Image (cartoon, helix red, strand yellow):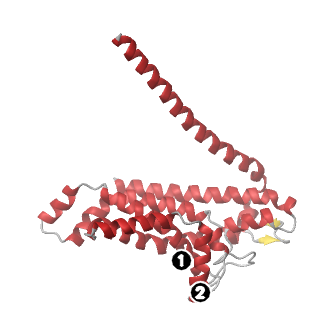
Amino acid sequence: MQQNKFTGKRANQAIFFSLFRLMSYLVVGILFCIIGFIVIRGIGVINWEFLTSAPKDGMTKGGIFPAIIGTFYLVIGSMLVAFPIGVMSGIYMNEYATNKHIVRVIRVMTNNLGGIPSIVFGLFGMSLFVNKLHFGDSLLAGSFTLGLLALPLIIRVTEEALKAIPDTYRQGSLALGATKLTTIRRVILPAAFPNVMTGLILSIGRVSGETAPILFTAAAYFLPHLPTSVFDQVMALPYHLYVIATSGTDLEATRPMAYGTAIVLIAIVLIMNLLANIVRRRFSK
C-alpha cells in the first residue's frame, strides 16, 4: 500500500514537473517566434546606410541614425535622474527609516507609482517639465519624465537588495567602530551592488522602449540633425517606429523600415542588458 502511495506521488511529481518544463519552453518558444517574425521582415533593410544616415524623402528612405543617438541620450539622461534618487530612497527605507508605518506608506505609494500607465507620466511630464519649468519639448524634459517612470522599480530593487545583506555585516562593521554611513558606503552597498544593478538593467529595458512618456515631452517627428543641447528635441526609436508604422507618407514602402527599426531597438536593449550584466558580474566577484 505504501509502495503504491509512493509511486503515485512520484507520478504526480513527474506530471507537474513536465507541465512546468512545458510552460518554460512555451515562453521561450513565443519569444523566439516574436523575434523571428520581426527579423524575417526587417533584416533586409539593415545595412550600414540604414544605421548611419538620417531619414530622407518623407522617411521612406535613408536611415535611423538620429533616432538611435536620441534613444541613447534619453536612456542615459533618465538613468542619471532615476538611479541616484532610487538608490538613496532604497537606502533610506531599509537602513535609516525607523517608523515602520511611514516605510509601509512609502512602499505602497512606490508600488502604486510603478503601476501608473506610462501615458500618465507623459502628461505629467508635459505639465511640469515642459510647461511649468519651461524646459520645452526637449531631451531634458524627456529624461526627467522617463526617470520618474523608472524610479519605482529602482527603489524596490534597491530595498530588496539591501534586505538580502545579513545583519552580521552591519553588526561587525559597527563593532569595529565604523559609523553607520561608513558601514553603508563601505560594506553594505558593495555587497548589494550586483543586485542593485538588476534594477538598473530592468529600468534600461523599460525606458528604451517607451513611447508615451516622450510623446509629449521630447520626441520629434523628424530632425535632420542631432541634438546639440539638452533643450533640443530628439528623435527616438520607439516613437520613430510608431510614426513610420502608422502615419508615414507611404506605409507600404516604410513597413520593412519599421521592422528594421524594431530589430535595432531590440538589439540596443540586449546590448545594454549584456553590458550591465558584465558590470554586475564583475562587482559580484
Q: Give the residue at x 51% y 63%.
A: 203
Is 126 situated above or below 51? below
Q: Give the residue at x 38% y 69%.
A: 106
Mark found first going from the N terminus, 1 or 2:
2
In the picture, the disc for residue 85 is none
| Side of 80 where 167 appears, left or right | left
Residue 100 location (% of width, % of height): 29, 66
Q: Which residue is mark 2?
A: 135
Name of the residue lying farthest toward the top: 1
Q: Which residue is mark 1?
A: 144
Given residues 194 and 112, the one toward you in this image is 112
> Would you say residue 66 is visible in this rendering?
yes
Residue 126 location (% of width, % of height): 62, 80
User: Crowding at label 2, few (<14), some or many (≥20) Cα neighbours within 10 Å?
Assistant: many
Is 27 situated above or below 267? above
| Side of 188 where 278 appears, left or right | right
Discs 1, 2 touching: Cβ within 8 Å: yes
Q: Quadrant of the N terminus?
A: top left
Q: Give the residue at x 28% y 56%.
A: 165
When asked about the image quadrant of residue 211, the answer is bottom right
User: Crowding at label 1, few (<14), some or many (≥20) Cα neighbours within 10 Å?
Assistant: many
Identify which amino acid the numbered label 2 is placed on.
Answer: Phe
> Would you say residue 230 is visible in this rendering?
no
When asked about the image quadrant of residue 225, the answer is bottom right
Q: Give the residue at x 36% y 71%.
A: 88
When asked about the image quadrant of residue 52, the answer is bottom right
Residue 207 location (% of width, % of height): 57, 65
